[in-house]
Image: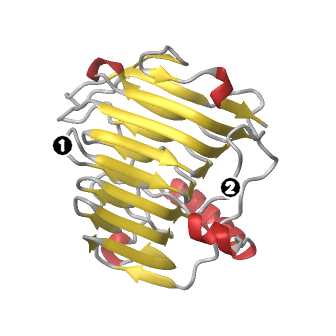
Amino acid sequence: MTKRAATPAGRARRTGRRRMISASATALALTGAALTTGLLVRSADAAPTAAVAGWPTPAGSQAVPATIEVSGTYDGGLKRFYGSGDLGDGGQSEDQDPVFELADGAVLKNVVVGSPAADGIHCLGSCTLQNVWWEDVGEDAASFKGTSSGAVYKVTGGGAKGADDKVFQFNGAGSLTVSGFQVSDFGKLVRSCGNCSKQYKRTITVSDVDVTAPGKSLVGINTNYGDTATLRSVRIHGDSSKKIKPCVRYTGNDSGAEPKETGSGPDGTYCKYSASDISYG
């Protein structure tokens, strides 16, 4: 998708939001069990409530002037990591480096990504993001870039706030599962890249997530490349008018042009869910 350059007014708006997020993060705390898993346990058929689980209080902060490269498992101990130096301009450029870059098979867990967040997290192959929280999404929260059709990306627990556009950018091949996650104030939760120079078939599953308005859509897929999106146990809060679209279909391209939206809603082939999989409250 086409990215936007930051404007002075945009940076000022994001700065104000960061201050509010910082105050909220300080005021809210999870129980010990929730800190471990990044979510509260609910039955699959539970109705949405007025509020979702609180966010963890970071255990200290660490400035990151250059990308942290991860292979194996990296446990951040729920410390806040934020961009500084070249990673600290707070802009929306698509050329930014990430705060974390994960090698194929890497696991990143118990991390709070603070602000500025640069280009978040890059997965170069299969990866697992466990109990990772983004206080104010920068360019994207995470980008999945593996080129193997067998690549598997997992996001379990955690949450994200303040994504002007996308939370998860799916540029590569393979399958992505997002579960036990919460998101608020966002554009799109997951977007299969609509105009990357190299395109792939992508499989997306979103389950047991709490979504708080405002937001535009949960998943965007390219039907012409065979993408599919499966939605289960999605709880949408603060959107009684149902403006957030659960699944949007596009015709993607590899030329860099803006992809064309062709429809939305369940169709049994590309957008796989039923009305009972989405609840509002």
Residue in the foreground of this view, choosing between 207 and 140: 207
User: At x 54% / y 18%, what residue is drawn?
Assistant: 266
> What is the three-letter code of the residue carrying label 1?
Ser
In the image, 208: left or right of 114? right
User: In terms of sequence position, does the residue under pointer 1 or pointer 2 come before the other?
Assistant: 2
Q: Is residue 118 above or below residue 77?
A: above
Residue placed furthest toward the front: 43
* Residue 184 appears in the picture as rendered: yes
- Colour scheme in the image? secondary structure
Q: In which quadrant of the rendered image does the N terminus lie?
A: top left
Q: Is residue 122 above or below residue 269?
A: below
Q: Is residue 35 above or below residue 154?
A: below
* Residue 139 appears in the picture as rendered: no
Choose mark 1 or mark 2, whichever is in front.
2
Give the residue number, with chain letter if any, for mark 1: 148
Rendered location of residue 102, percent (x, y): 28, 64
> What is the three-letter code of the residue carrying label 2?
Val
Give the quadrant of residue 262: top left
User: At x 71% / y 68%, what residue is drawn?
Assistant: 24
Q: Secondary structure at mark 2?
A: loop
Residues under labels 1 and 2: Cα distance?
A: 33 Å
Residue in the foreground of this view, choosing between 22 and 278: 278
Rendered location of residue 124, percent (x, y): 23, 55
Residue placed furthest toward the right: 50
Give the quadrant of residue 25: bottom right
Q: Secondary structure at mark 1?
A: loop
In the image, 255: left or right of 109? left
Give the residue number, with chain letter if any, for mark 2: 41
In the image, 53: left or right of 110? right
- Local crowd size for mark 2, using a 10 Å CA cut-off: few (<14), some (14–19), many (≥20): few
